[in-house]
Amino acid sequence: MKALLALKVYLVKYRWRFLFGIVFVFFANYFSAKVPVYAGKAINGITDRATLMQELRDAALLLVCIAGLGGAFRYLMRRVLIDTSRDIEFDFRNDIYKKLQSLDATFYDGNNTGDIMSRMTNDLDMIRMVLGPAIMYTANTIFVLPIVLIQMFRLNWQVTVAGLMPLVLLPALVKIFGARLHHGYRAQQDALGDLTTYTQESLAGIRVVKAYAQEQNQERKFDAENDHYIKVSLDLAKTLAYFRPAIQLIAGSGLAIILVVGARQIMAGSLDYGDLTALLLLFGMLVWPMIAAGWVINLYQRANSAMERIAGITEAKSMVGDSPTAVSAADLPGDLDVEFRDLTFAYPGAEEEPVLKNITLKIPSGTTLGIIGRVGAGKSTLVHLLLRLYPVERGQLFLGGIDINDWPLAELRRRVAIVFQETFLFSDTLSENIRFGALSELTQEQIEDAARQANVHDDIAGFPKGYETMLGERGINLSGGQKQRTAIARALVRDSSLLILDDALSAVDTQTEEQILGHLETVMANRSVFLISHRISTVSMADHIIVLEDGVITAQGRHESLLAQPGLYTELHRKQLLEEEVEAIG
Protein backbone atom coordinates (compact mmCIF):
# COMPACT_ATOMS: atom_id res chain seq x y z
CA MET A 1 0.00 0.00 0.00
CA LYS A 2 3.03 2.28 -0.17
CA ALA A 3 1.81 3.87 -3.40
CA LEU A 4 -1.24 5.27 -1.59
CA LEU A 5 0.98 7.26 0.79
CA ALA A 6 1.29 9.84 -1.98
CA LEU A 7 -2.32 10.82 -1.22
CA LYS A 8 -1.52 12.06 2.28
CA VAL A 9 -1.28 15.66 1.04
CA TYR A 10 -4.99 15.56 0.16
CA LEU A 11 -5.91 13.87 3.43
CA VAL A 12 -4.12 16.65 5.30
CA LYS A 13 -5.83 19.32 3.22
CA TYR A 14 -9.30 17.96 4.07
CA ARG A 15 -8.41 16.65 7.53
CA TRP A 16 -11.17 18.52 9.36
CA ARG A 17 -13.87 17.24 7.04
CA PHE A 18 -12.54 13.71 7.44
CA LEU A 19 -12.51 14.21 11.22
CA PHE A 20 -16.15 15.33 11.28
CA GLY A 21 -17.10 12.47 8.98
CA ILE A 22 -15.42 9.91 11.24
CA VAL A 23 -17.15 11.41 14.31
CA PHE A 24 -20.46 10.93 12.48
CA VAL A 25 -19.47 7.31 11.77
CA PHE A 26 -18.94 6.74 15.49
CA PHE A 27 -22.34 8.13 16.51
CA ALA A 28 -24.10 6.30 13.68
CA ASN A 29 -22.76 2.99 15.01
CA TYR A 30 -23.28 3.93 18.66
CA PHE A 31 -26.98 4.60 18.24
CA SER A 32 -27.45 1.70 15.83
CA ALA A 33 -25.97 -0.69 18.41
CA LYS A 34 -28.47 0.49 21.01
CA VAL A 35 -31.44 -0.69 18.94
CA PRO A 36 -30.83 -4.46 19.42
CA VAL A 37 -30.18 -3.94 23.15
CA TYR A 38 -33.46 -2.12 23.75
CA ALA A 39 -35.31 -4.52 21.44
CA GLY A 40 -33.98 -7.43 23.53
CA LYS A 41 -35.14 -5.76 26.76
CA ALA A 42 -38.62 -5.26 25.28
CA ILE A 43 -38.81 -8.93 24.28
CA ASN A 44 -37.71 -9.98 27.76
CA GLY A 45 -40.48 -7.85 29.22
CA ILE A 46 -43.04 -9.41 26.89
CA THR A 47 -41.97 -12.97 27.65
CA ASP A 48 -42.08 -12.22 31.39
CA ARG A 49 -45.54 -10.67 30.88
CA ALA A 50 -44.36 -7.79 33.02
CA THR A 51 -44.63 -5.12 30.33
CA LEU A 52 -47.77 -2.99 30.07
CA MET A 53 -49.07 -1.76 26.73
CA GLN A 54 -48.08 1.81 27.58
CA GLU A 55 -44.57 0.67 28.44
CA LEU A 56 -44.44 -1.23 25.16
CA ARG A 57 -45.46 1.89 23.27
CA ASP A 58 -42.79 3.87 25.13
CA ALA A 59 -40.19 1.24 24.24
CA ALA A 60 -41.27 1.33 20.59
CA LEU A 61 -41.07 5.14 20.53
CA LEU A 62 -37.59 4.97 22.12
CA LEU A 63 -36.47 2.47 19.50
CA VAL A 64 -37.74 4.74 16.71
CA CYS A 65 -35.89 7.73 18.19
CA ILE A 66 -32.64 5.80 18.60
CA ALA A 67 -32.92 4.33 15.10
CA GLY A 68 -33.68 7.83 13.76
CA LEU A 69 -30.58 9.27 15.39
CA GLY A 70 -28.49 6.42 13.97
CA GLY A 71 -29.95 7.02 10.51
CA ALA A 72 -29.35 10.79 10.71
CA PHE A 73 -25.69 10.34 11.64
CA ARG A 74 -25.32 7.69 8.93
CA TYR A 75 -26.64 10.18 6.38
CA LEU A 76 -24.21 12.85 7.64
CA MET A 77 -21.23 10.48 7.52
CA ARG A 78 -21.98 9.54 3.92
CA ARG A 79 -22.64 13.13 2.91
CA VAL A 80 -19.39 14.45 4.39
CA LEU A 81 -17.01 11.61 3.45
CA ILE A 82 -18.35 10.92 -0.06
CA ASP A 83 -18.50 14.65 -0.88
CA THR A 84 -14.93 15.03 0.35
CA SER A 85 -13.77 12.17 -1.87
CA ARG A 86 -15.34 13.95 -4.86
CA ASP A 87 -13.53 17.17 -3.96
CA ILE A 88 -10.23 15.31 -3.69
CA GLU A 89 -10.92 13.67 -7.05
CA PHE A 90 -11.44 17.16 -8.51
CA ASP A 91 -8.18 18.45 -7.00
CA PHE A 92 -6.20 15.35 -7.92
CA ARG A 93 -7.40 15.37 -11.53
CA ASN A 94 -6.46 19.06 -11.83
CA ASP A 95 -3.03 18.35 -10.35
CA ILE A 96 -2.43 15.45 -12.74
CA TYR A 97 -3.47 17.59 -15.72
CA LYS A 98 -1.19 20.38 -14.54
CA LYS A 99 1.62 17.85 -14.24
CA LEU A 100 0.94 16.58 -17.75
CA GLN A 101 1.19 20.14 -19.03
CA SER A 102 4.60 20.53 -17.39
CA LEU A 103 6.17 17.35 -18.80
CA ASP A 104 8.42 17.60 -21.82
CA ALA A 105 8.19 15.89 -25.20
CA THR A 106 10.32 12.95 -24.00
CA PHE A 107 7.49 11.78 -21.72
CA TYR A 108 4.92 11.84 -24.51
CA ASP A 109 7.30 10.09 -26.88
CA GLY A 110 7.24 7.10 -24.51
CA ASN A 111 3.57 7.06 -23.42
CA ASN A 112 0.44 6.41 -25.44
CA THR A 113 -2.39 8.91 -25.33
CA GLY A 114 -5.00 6.22 -24.71
CA ASP A 115 -3.09 4.85 -21.71
CA ILE A 116 -2.74 8.35 -20.24
CA MET A 117 -6.50 8.85 -20.70
CA SER A 118 -7.16 5.55 -18.93
CA ARG A 119 -5.07 6.69 -15.95
CA MET A 120 -6.91 10.02 -15.86
CA THR A 121 -10.33 8.34 -15.83
CA ASN A 122 -10.56 4.70 -14.71
CA ASP A 123 -7.54 4.72 -12.41
CA LEU A 124 -8.50 8.04 -10.86
CA ASP A 125 -11.98 6.69 -10.16
CA MET A 126 -10.36 3.89 -8.13
CA ILE A 127 -8.52 6.53 -6.10
CA ARG A 128 -11.79 8.33 -5.40
CA MET A 129 -13.36 5.10 -4.18
CA VAL A 130 -10.59 4.48 -1.69
CA LEU A 131 -10.74 8.07 -0.39
CA GLY A 132 -14.51 7.93 0.08
CA PRO A 133 -16.29 4.60 0.55
CA ALA A 134 -13.14 2.72 1.63
CA ILE A 135 -12.28 5.23 4.36
CA MET A 136 -15.92 5.37 5.45
CA TYR A 137 -16.28 1.59 5.75
CA THR A 138 -12.86 1.22 7.34
CA ALA A 139 -13.87 3.70 10.04
CA ASN A 140 -17.23 1.96 10.30
CA THR A 141 -15.50 -1.38 10.95
CA ILE A 142 -13.09 0.15 13.48
CA PHE A 143 -15.97 1.65 15.48
CA VAL A 144 -18.58 -1.05 15.12
CA LEU A 145 -16.34 -3.81 16.48
CA PRO A 146 -15.72 -2.36 19.97
CA ILE A 147 -19.20 -0.85 20.27
CA VAL A 148 -20.98 -4.07 19.33
CA LEU A 149 -18.61 -6.40 21.17
CA ILE A 150 -18.95 -4.44 24.42
CA GLN A 151 -22.73 -4.79 24.19
CA MET A 152 -22.46 -8.51 23.37
CA PHE A 153 -20.07 -9.25 26.25
CA ARG A 154 -22.39 -7.45 28.64
CA LEU A 155 -25.25 -9.69 27.56
CA ASN A 156 -23.38 -13.02 27.62
CA TRP A 157 -19.65 -13.47 27.21
CA GLN A 158 -19.74 -17.24 26.64
CA VAL A 159 -22.07 -17.00 23.66
CA THR A 160 -20.10 -14.03 22.31
CA VAL A 161 -16.74 -15.83 22.49
CA ALA A 162 -18.21 -18.89 20.80
CA GLY A 163 -19.67 -16.81 17.97
CA LEU A 164 -16.41 -14.95 17.38
CA MET A 165 -14.29 -18.09 17.01
CA PRO A 166 -14.68 -18.35 13.19
CA LEU A 167 -13.36 -14.79 12.84
CA VAL A 168 -9.82 -15.94 13.60
CA LEU A 169 -9.74 -17.24 10.03
CA LEU A 170 -10.12 -13.73 8.55
CA PRO A 171 -6.43 -12.60 8.74
CA ALA A 172 -5.25 -15.75 6.95
CA LEU A 173 -7.96 -15.31 4.33
CA VAL A 174 -6.95 -11.70 3.68
CA LYS A 175 -3.27 -12.65 3.41
CA ILE A 176 -3.96 -15.44 0.92
CA PHE A 177 -6.17 -13.39 -1.37
CA GLY A 178 -4.53 -9.95 -0.93
CA ALA A 179 -1.54 -10.56 -3.22
CA ARG A 180 -3.72 -12.27 -5.83
CA LEU A 181 -6.15 -9.37 -5.89
CA HIS A 182 -3.38 -6.79 -6.22
CA HIS A 183 -1.84 -8.65 -9.17
CA GLY A 184 -5.26 -9.17 -10.74
CA TYR A 185 -6.33 -5.53 -10.49
CA ARG A 186 -2.98 -4.30 -11.88
CA ALA A 187 -3.26 -6.69 -14.84
CA GLN A 188 -6.85 -5.61 -15.46
CA GLN A 189 -6.00 -1.89 -15.41
CA ASP A 190 -2.99 -2.36 -17.69
CA ALA A 191 -5.13 -4.33 -20.13
CA LEU A 192 -7.78 -1.61 -20.05
CA GLY A 193 -5.10 0.99 -20.78
CA ASP A 194 -3.93 -1.02 -23.82
CA LEU A 195 -7.51 -1.43 -25.01
CA THR A 196 -8.19 2.31 -24.62
CA THR A 197 -5.00 3.17 -26.50
CA TYR A 198 -5.88 0.90 -29.41
CA THR A 199 -9.44 2.23 -29.57
CA GLN A 200 -8.26 5.85 -29.51
CA GLU A 201 -5.72 5.27 -32.28
CA SER A 202 -8.21 3.33 -34.41
CA LEU A 203 -10.84 6.06 -34.20
CA ALA A 204 -8.31 8.86 -34.75
CA GLY A 205 -7.11 7.10 -37.90
CA ILE A 206 -10.53 5.94 -39.10
CA ARG A 207 -10.12 7.61 -42.51
CA VAL A 208 -6.88 5.69 -43.12
CA VAL A 209 -8.55 2.46 -42.01
CA LYS A 210 -11.42 2.94 -44.45
CA ALA A 211 -9.18 4.14 -47.27
CA TYR A 212 -7.15 0.91 -47.06
CA ALA A 213 -10.22 -1.28 -46.42
CA GLN A 214 -8.69 -2.54 -43.16
CA GLU A 215 -11.93 -2.64 -41.15
CA GLN A 216 -11.90 -6.42 -40.67
CA ASN A 217 -8.21 -6.46 -39.79
CA GLN A 218 -8.78 -3.73 -37.21
CA GLU A 219 -11.73 -5.65 -35.80
CA ARG A 220 -9.54 -8.74 -35.39
CA LYS A 221 -6.89 -6.74 -33.56
CA PHE A 222 -9.55 -5.14 -31.39
CA ASP A 223 -10.98 -8.59 -30.62
CA ALA A 224 -7.52 -9.73 -29.52
CA GLU A 225 -7.10 -6.74 -27.19
CA ASN A 226 -10.63 -7.18 -25.91
CA ASP A 227 -10.11 -10.92 -25.36
CA HIS A 228 -7.01 -10.20 -23.29
CA TYR A 229 -8.95 -7.68 -21.19
CA ILE A 230 -11.78 -10.17 -20.70
CA LYS A 231 -9.33 -12.93 -19.75
CA VAL A 232 -7.60 -10.92 -17.00
CA SER A 233 -11.00 -9.64 -15.81
CA LEU A 234 -12.36 -13.17 -15.58
CA ASP A 235 -9.25 -14.30 -13.69
CA LEU A 236 -9.88 -11.49 -11.22
CA ALA A 237 -13.57 -12.38 -11.01
CA LYS A 238 -12.65 -15.98 -10.17
CA THR A 239 -10.49 -14.81 -7.29
CA LEU A 240 -13.32 -12.60 -6.01
CA ALA A 241 -15.76 -15.47 -6.47
CA TYR A 242 -13.82 -17.42 -3.81
CA PHE A 243 -12.98 -14.47 -1.58
CA ARG A 244 -16.41 -12.94 -0.94
CA PRO A 245 -18.30 -16.20 -0.28
CA ALA A 246 -15.49 -17.27 2.08
CA ILE A 247 -16.09 -14.14 4.18
CA GLN A 248 -19.85 -14.72 4.12
CA LEU A 249 -19.29 -18.35 5.19
CA ILE A 250 -17.25 -17.20 8.19
CA ALA A 251 -19.96 -14.68 9.14
CA GLY A 252 -22.72 -17.25 8.71
CA SER A 253 -20.80 -19.77 10.83
CA GLY A 254 -20.63 -17.25 13.66
CA LEU A 255 -24.41 -16.69 13.54
CA ALA A 256 -25.07 -20.43 13.56
CA ILE A 257 -22.80 -20.94 16.57
CA ILE A 258 -24.53 -18.13 18.51
CA LEU A 259 -27.92 -19.63 17.71
CA VAL A 260 -26.91 -23.15 18.84
CA VAL A 261 -24.99 -22.11 21.99
CA GLY A 262 -27.62 -19.49 22.89
CA ALA A 263 -30.46 -21.98 22.49
CA ARG A 264 -28.71 -24.40 24.87
CA GLN A 265 -28.28 -21.66 27.44
CA ILE A 266 -31.97 -20.71 27.15
CA MET A 267 -32.91 -24.34 27.80
CA ALA A 268 -30.52 -24.31 30.75
CA GLY A 269 -32.18 -21.15 32.06
CA SER A 270 -29.01 -19.01 31.91
CA LEU A 271 -30.09 -16.83 28.94
CA ASP A 272 -33.31 -14.99 28.11
CA TYR A 273 -35.03 -14.97 24.73
CA GLY A 274 -34.59 -11.22 24.45
CA ASP A 275 -30.87 -11.45 25.16
CA LEU A 276 -30.42 -14.13 22.47
CA THR A 277 -32.35 -11.95 20.04
CA ALA A 278 -30.13 -8.99 20.92
CA LEU A 279 -27.00 -11.13 20.48
CA LEU A 280 -28.15 -12.29 17.04
CA LEU A 281 -29.02 -8.74 15.99
CA LEU A 282 -25.72 -7.38 17.31
CA PHE A 283 -23.71 -10.10 15.59
CA GLY A 284 -25.69 -9.28 12.45
CA MET A 285 -24.23 -5.78 12.75
CA LEU A 286 -20.78 -7.42 12.57
CA VAL A 287 -21.67 -9.42 9.45
CA TRP A 288 -21.85 -6.43 7.11
CA PRO A 289 -18.50 -4.97 8.28
CA MET A 290 -16.94 -8.39 7.68
CA ILE A 291 -18.40 -8.52 4.16
CA ALA A 292 -17.53 -4.86 3.66
CA ALA A 293 -14.00 -5.60 4.86
CA GLY A 294 -13.54 -7.87 1.86
CA TRP A 295 -14.91 -5.16 -0.43
CA VAL A 296 -12.70 -2.52 1.21
CA ILE A 297 -9.64 -4.75 0.79
CA ASN A 298 -10.55 -5.00 -2.89
CA LEU A 299 -10.81 -1.22 -3.09
CA TYR A 300 -7.42 -0.72 -1.44
CA GLN A 301 -5.81 -3.25 -3.77
CA ARG A 302 -7.39 -1.66 -6.84
CA ALA A 303 -6.48 1.84 -5.67
CA ASN A 304 -2.92 0.78 -4.93
CA SER A 305 -2.59 -0.65 -8.44
CA ALA A 306 -4.17 2.50 -9.88
CA MET A 307 -1.85 4.72 -7.88
CA GLU A 308 1.18 2.82 -9.13
CA ARG A 309 0.05 3.58 -12.69
CA ILE A 310 -0.75 7.21 -11.91
CA ALA A 311 2.66 7.52 -10.27
CA GLY A 312 4.03 7.08 -13.77
CA ILE A 313 2.70 10.60 -14.34
CA THR A 314 3.01 12.25 -10.93
CA GLU A 315 6.58 11.04 -10.37
CA ALA A 316 7.74 11.64 -13.93
CA LYS A 317 10.59 14.13 -14.11
CA SER A 318 10.77 16.60 -16.94
CA MET A 319 14.20 16.71 -18.55
CA VAL A 320 13.55 20.34 -19.45
CA GLY A 321 12.87 23.03 -16.86
CA ASP A 322 13.93 26.40 -15.53
CA SER A 323 17.54 26.51 -14.42
CA PRO A 324 18.51 27.94 -10.99
CA THR A 325 20.69 30.36 -12.93
CA ALA A 326 17.83 31.45 -15.21
CA VAL A 327 17.94 35.11 -16.23
CA SER A 328 15.04 37.28 -15.09
CA ALA A 329 12.59 38.41 -17.76
CA ALA A 330 13.64 42.05 -17.30
CA ASP A 331 17.25 41.21 -18.19
CA LEU A 332 16.48 39.27 -21.37
CA PRO A 333 17.52 40.88 -24.67
CA GLY A 334 14.97 42.22 -27.12
CA ASP A 335 16.80 40.96 -30.21
CA LEU A 336 17.01 37.21 -30.75
CA ASP A 337 20.16 36.40 -32.65
CA VAL A 338 20.60 32.60 -32.68
CA GLU A 339 23.93 30.84 -32.37
CA PHE A 340 24.73 27.11 -32.52
CA ARG A 341 28.19 26.26 -31.19
CA ASP A 342 29.33 22.82 -32.26
CA LEU A 343 25.92 21.43 -31.27
CA THR A 344 25.47 17.66 -31.26
CA PHE A 345 22.12 16.22 -30.22
CA ALA A 346 20.66 12.75 -29.76
CA TYR A 347 17.17 11.93 -28.51
CA PRO A 348 17.01 10.62 -24.92
CA GLY A 349 17.47 6.86 -24.95
CA ALA A 350 19.25 6.91 -28.32
CA GLU A 351 22.47 8.66 -27.35
CA GLU A 352 24.53 6.46 -29.67
CA GLU A 353 22.67 7.79 -32.72
CA PRO A 354 22.97 11.60 -32.79
CA VAL A 355 20.45 13.33 -35.04
CA LEU A 356 22.47 16.56 -35.29
CA LYS A 357 26.25 16.60 -35.45
CA ASN A 358 28.63 19.50 -34.87
CA ILE A 359 26.19 22.23 -35.94
CA THR A 360 27.95 25.62 -35.91
CA LEU A 361 25.87 28.53 -37.14
CA LYS A 362 25.14 32.15 -36.21
CA ILE A 363 21.92 33.85 -37.36
CA PRO A 364 21.63 37.59 -36.59
CA SER A 365 18.32 38.95 -35.32
CA GLY A 366 15.91 39.86 -38.12
CA THR A 367 17.38 37.28 -40.51
CA THR A 368 15.33 34.80 -42.49
CA LEU A 369 17.04 31.40 -42.42
CA GLY A 370 16.10 28.71 -44.90
CA ILE A 371 16.67 25.07 -43.89
CA ILE A 372 16.45 22.41 -46.55
CA GLY A 373 17.25 18.73 -46.69
CA ARG A 374 15.83 15.31 -47.28
CA VAL A 375 13.41 13.55 -44.90
CA GLY A 376 15.17 12.57 -41.66
CA ALA A 377 18.03 15.02 -42.10
CA GLY A 378 17.31 16.69 -38.71
CA LYS A 379 15.55 19.86 -39.90
CA SER A 380 12.62 19.68 -37.46
CA THR A 381 14.87 18.58 -34.60
CA LEU A 382 17.02 21.67 -35.08
CA VAL A 383 14.11 24.08 -34.58
CA HIS A 384 12.53 22.00 -31.80
CA LEU A 385 15.66 22.68 -29.77
CA LEU A 386 14.98 26.42 -30.08
CA LEU A 387 11.84 25.80 -28.02
CA ARG A 388 13.69 23.45 -25.64
CA LEU A 389 11.21 20.69 -26.32
CA TYR A 390 14.20 18.45 -25.62
CA PRO A 391 17.23 19.00 -23.34
CA VAL A 392 20.19 20.86 -24.84
CA GLU A 393 23.68 20.67 -23.38
CA ARG A 394 25.11 23.90 -22.02
CA GLY A 395 27.35 25.94 -24.26
CA GLN A 396 25.85 24.65 -27.51
CA LEU A 397 22.87 26.92 -28.22
CA PHE A 398 22.50 30.64 -27.49
CA LEU A 399 19.63 33.11 -27.97
CA GLY A 400 20.47 36.79 -27.70
CA GLY A 401 23.90 35.82 -26.38
CA ILE A 402 22.37 33.87 -23.47
CA ASP A 403 22.65 30.10 -23.13
CA ILE A 404 19.22 28.69 -23.94
CA ASN A 405 19.30 26.78 -20.62
CA ASP A 406 19.33 30.14 -18.80
CA TRP A 407 16.15 31.33 -20.50
CA PRO A 408 12.98 30.89 -18.40
CA LEU A 409 10.87 28.40 -20.35
CA ALA A 410 7.71 30.50 -20.27
CA GLU A 411 9.53 33.61 -21.51
CA LEU A 412 11.40 31.64 -24.19
CA ARG A 413 8.21 30.22 -25.63
CA ARG A 414 6.47 33.59 -25.48
CA ARG A 415 9.16 34.88 -27.87
CA VAL A 416 8.76 32.02 -30.37
CA ALA A 417 5.85 31.09 -32.65
CA ILE A 418 5.96 27.82 -34.54
CA VAL A 419 3.88 26.07 -37.16
CA PHE A 420 4.65 22.39 -36.75
CA GLN A 421 5.08 19.97 -39.60
CA GLU A 422 2.06 18.02 -38.38
CA THR A 423 -0.77 20.55 -38.18
CA PHE A 424 -3.00 20.25 -35.14
CA LEU A 425 -6.26 22.16 -34.80
CA PHE A 426 -8.62 21.94 -31.83
CA SER A 427 -12.29 20.93 -31.98
CA ASP A 428 -13.39 24.53 -31.66
CA THR A 429 -14.31 27.42 -33.95
CA LEU A 430 -11.86 28.71 -36.54
CA SER A 431 -11.79 32.01 -34.67
CA GLU A 432 -10.77 30.32 -31.41
CA ASN A 433 -8.14 28.21 -33.15
CA ILE A 434 -6.48 31.35 -34.52
CA ARG A 435 -6.88 33.21 -31.21
CA PHE A 436 -5.13 30.33 -29.42
CA GLY A 437 -1.72 31.64 -30.49
CA ALA A 438 -2.21 35.12 -29.05
CA LEU A 439 -0.56 36.37 -25.87
CA SER A 440 -3.30 38.94 -25.25
CA GLU A 441 -6.91 39.60 -26.20
CA LEU A 442 -7.55 39.92 -29.94
CA THR A 443 -10.21 41.80 -31.85
CA GLN A 444 -12.02 40.11 -34.71
CA GLU A 445 -10.25 42.52 -37.04
CA GLN A 446 -6.84 41.30 -35.85
CA ILE A 447 -7.90 37.67 -36.33
CA GLU A 448 -9.04 38.39 -39.87
CA ASP A 449 -5.87 40.34 -40.64
CA ALA A 450 -3.74 37.32 -39.61
CA ALA A 451 -5.95 35.07 -41.75
CA ARG A 452 -5.41 37.38 -44.75
CA GLN A 453 -1.64 37.25 -44.26
CA ALA A 454 -1.89 33.44 -44.18
CA ASN A 455 -4.06 33.56 -47.33
CA VAL A 456 -6.94 31.69 -45.65
CA HIS A 457 -9.43 34.54 -45.08
CA ASP A 458 -11.30 34.01 -48.36
CA ASP A 459 -11.69 30.29 -47.63
CA ILE A 460 -13.08 31.02 -44.15
CA ALA A 461 -15.38 33.74 -45.44
CA GLY A 462 -16.82 31.20 -47.87
CA PHE A 463 -18.00 28.92 -45.06
CA PRO A 464 -21.67 29.35 -44.02
CA LYS A 465 -20.67 30.36 -40.48
CA GLY A 466 -17.39 32.01 -41.40
CA TYR A 467 -14.99 32.31 -38.49
CA GLU A 468 -17.55 30.67 -36.18
CA THR A 469 -17.37 27.43 -38.14
CA MET A 470 -16.90 24.57 -35.70
CA LEU A 471 -14.07 22.23 -36.61
CA GLY A 472 -14.17 18.47 -36.19
CA GLU A 473 -11.46 16.48 -34.46
CA ARG A 474 -8.03 17.77 -35.58
CA GLY A 475 -9.78 20.06 -38.05
CA ILE A 476 -11.03 17.12 -40.11
CA ASN A 477 -13.50 19.26 -42.07
CA LEU A 478 -10.70 21.38 -43.57
CA SER A 479 -8.37 20.46 -46.38
CA GLY A 480 -4.68 19.96 -45.65
CA GLY A 481 -3.82 23.36 -47.11
CA GLN A 482 -6.57 25.12 -45.15
CA LYS A 483 -5.36 23.54 -41.93
CA GLN A 484 -1.78 24.63 -42.57
CA ARG A 485 -2.81 28.18 -43.41
CA THR A 486 -5.03 28.37 -40.31
CA ALA A 487 -2.03 27.23 -38.24
CA ILE A 488 0.10 29.94 -39.87
CA ALA A 489 -2.53 32.55 -38.93
CA ARG A 490 -2.42 31.20 -35.35
CA ALA A 491 1.35 31.73 -35.29
CA LEU A 492 1.13 35.23 -36.78
CA VAL A 493 -1.20 36.60 -34.08
CA ARG A 494 1.48 35.80 -31.51
CA ASP A 495 3.63 38.71 -32.74
CA SER A 496 6.76 36.85 -31.63
CA SER A 497 10.45 37.67 -32.05
CA LEU A 498 11.11 34.36 -33.83
CA LEU A 499 8.75 32.70 -36.31
CA ILE A 500 9.36 29.06 -37.27
CA LEU A 501 7.59 27.51 -40.26
CA ASP A 502 8.39 23.81 -40.17
CA ASP A 503 7.44 22.66 -43.67
CA ALA A 504 4.24 24.65 -43.11
CA LEU A 505 3.50 25.09 -46.82
CA SER A 506 3.86 21.47 -47.90
CA ALA A 507 0.09 21.01 -48.39
CA VAL A 508 -0.42 24.05 -50.67
CA ASP A 509 0.37 24.37 -54.34
CA THR A 510 3.25 26.49 -55.66
CA GLN A 511 0.97 29.40 -56.61
CA THR A 512 -0.65 29.55 -53.16
CA GLU A 513 2.80 29.25 -51.60
CA GLU A 514 3.97 32.32 -53.53
CA GLN A 515 0.89 34.26 -52.41
CA ILE A 516 1.43 33.33 -48.74
CA LEU A 517 5.13 34.22 -48.86
CA GLY A 518 4.23 37.50 -50.52
CA HIS A 519 1.81 38.32 -47.69
CA LEU A 520 4.46 37.33 -45.14
CA GLU A 521 7.19 39.60 -46.50
CA THR A 522 6.11 42.48 -44.24
CA VAL A 523 5.84 40.18 -41.22
CA MET A 524 9.19 38.53 -41.91
CA ALA A 525 10.95 41.85 -42.23
CA ASN A 526 10.35 42.64 -38.56
CA ARG A 527 11.42 39.37 -36.96
CA SER A 528 13.73 36.36 -37.24
CA VAL A 529 12.25 33.59 -39.36
CA PHE A 530 13.27 29.96 -39.78
CA LEU A 531 11.83 28.43 -42.97
CA ILE A 532 12.01 24.64 -43.24
CA SER A 533 11.00 23.06 -46.50
CA HIS A 534 11.72 20.39 -49.06
CA ARG A 535 10.96 22.97 -51.78
CA ILE A 536 13.64 25.27 -53.11
CA SER A 537 10.96 27.86 -53.95
CA THR A 538 10.07 28.22 -50.26
CA VAL A 539 13.58 29.02 -49.05
CA SER A 540 14.98 30.78 -52.13
CA MET A 541 14.10 34.24 -50.80
CA ALA A 542 15.81 33.60 -47.42
CA ASP A 543 18.76 35.75 -46.32
CA HIS A 544 20.76 32.62 -45.53
CA ILE A 545 20.17 28.97 -46.40
CA ILE A 546 21.67 25.83 -44.88
CA VAL A 547 21.56 22.34 -46.36
CA LEU A 548 21.27 19.49 -43.87
CA GLU A 549 22.30 15.94 -44.72
CA ASP A 550 22.27 13.25 -42.01
CA GLY A 551 22.39 15.90 -39.29
CA VAL A 552 25.37 17.76 -40.77
CA ILE A 553 25.43 21.14 -42.51
CA THR A 554 26.93 20.30 -45.90
CA ALA A 555 26.39 23.66 -47.59
CA GLN A 556 25.22 27.16 -46.73
CA GLY A 557 24.86 30.56 -48.32
CA ARG A 558 22.32 32.47 -50.42
CA HIS A 559 20.19 30.91 -53.12
CA GLU A 560 22.40 32.05 -55.98
CA SER A 561 25.65 30.88 -54.40
CA LEU A 562 24.22 27.45 -53.61
CA LEU A 563 23.02 26.99 -57.15
CA ALA A 564 26.55 27.76 -58.36
CA GLN A 565 28.00 24.71 -56.59
CA PRO A 566 27.21 21.02 -57.05
CA GLY A 567 25.37 19.20 -54.28
CA LEU A 568 21.97 18.42 -52.84
CA TYR A 569 20.63 21.97 -53.19
CA THR A 570 21.31 22.03 -56.95
CA GLU A 571 19.87 18.53 -57.30
CA LEU A 572 16.63 19.46 -55.50
CA HIS A 573 16.35 22.66 -57.56
CA ARG A 574 16.69 20.70 -60.80
CA LYS A 575 14.03 18.21 -59.71
CA GLN A 576 11.63 20.98 -58.72
CA LEU A 577 12.03 22.72 -62.10
CA LEU A 578 11.33 19.42 -63.83
CA GLU A 579 8.20 18.85 -61.74
CA GLU A 580 6.93 22.34 -62.61
CA GLU A 581 7.48 21.66 -66.30
CA VAL A 582 5.58 18.39 -66.07
CA GLU A 583 2.70 20.15 -64.28
CA ALA A 584 2.64 22.87 -66.94
CA ILE A 585 2.46 20.27 -69.71
CA GLY A 586 -0.28 18.36 -67.88
Image: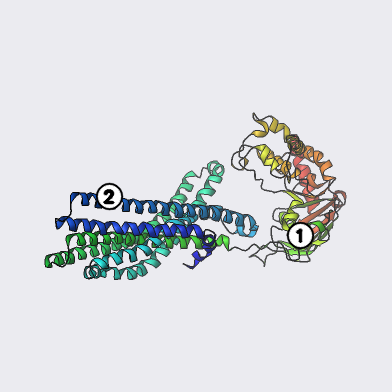
The colour scheme used here is rainbow
Residue pictured at 16% horizontal, 55% vertical: 46
Q: Quadrant of residue 129?
A: bottom left
Circle 1 is placed at which residue position? 407
Q: Amino acid at mark 1?
A: Trp
Q: Which tag is nearer the camera, tag 1 or tag 2?
A: 2
Q: Nearer the viewer, residue 558 or 289?
A: 289
Whether residue 190 is visible, yes or no, is: no
The relative height of residue 480 versus residue 20 in the rendered view (above or below) is above
- Image quadrant occupied by the C terminus: top right
Residue 153: image quadrant is bottom left
Give the x, y percent position of residue 241.
32, 59
Asked whether, in this view, residue 160 is left or right of residue 552, the answer is left
Graded by Cα atoms within 10 Å as few (under 14), some (14 to 19) or many (20 or more), the crowding at tag 2 reads few
Q: State how far apart marks 1 and 2 are (Cα).
A: 75 Å
Count the marks.
2
Q: Amino acid at mark 2?
A: Leu
Label 2: element kind:
helix
List the single residue furthest toward the left: 267
* Label 1 close to label 2 by CB (< 8 Å): no
Q: List x then y, in percent, for residue 304.
A: 46, 63
On screen, residue 433 versus residue 268, left or right, reads: right
Seen from the viewer's position, the closer of residues 206 and 348 is 348
- Dot 1 lies on which element? loop
The reply, left or right, for residue 432 in relation to residue 195 is: right
Residue 303: assigned label: none
- Residue of label 2: 61
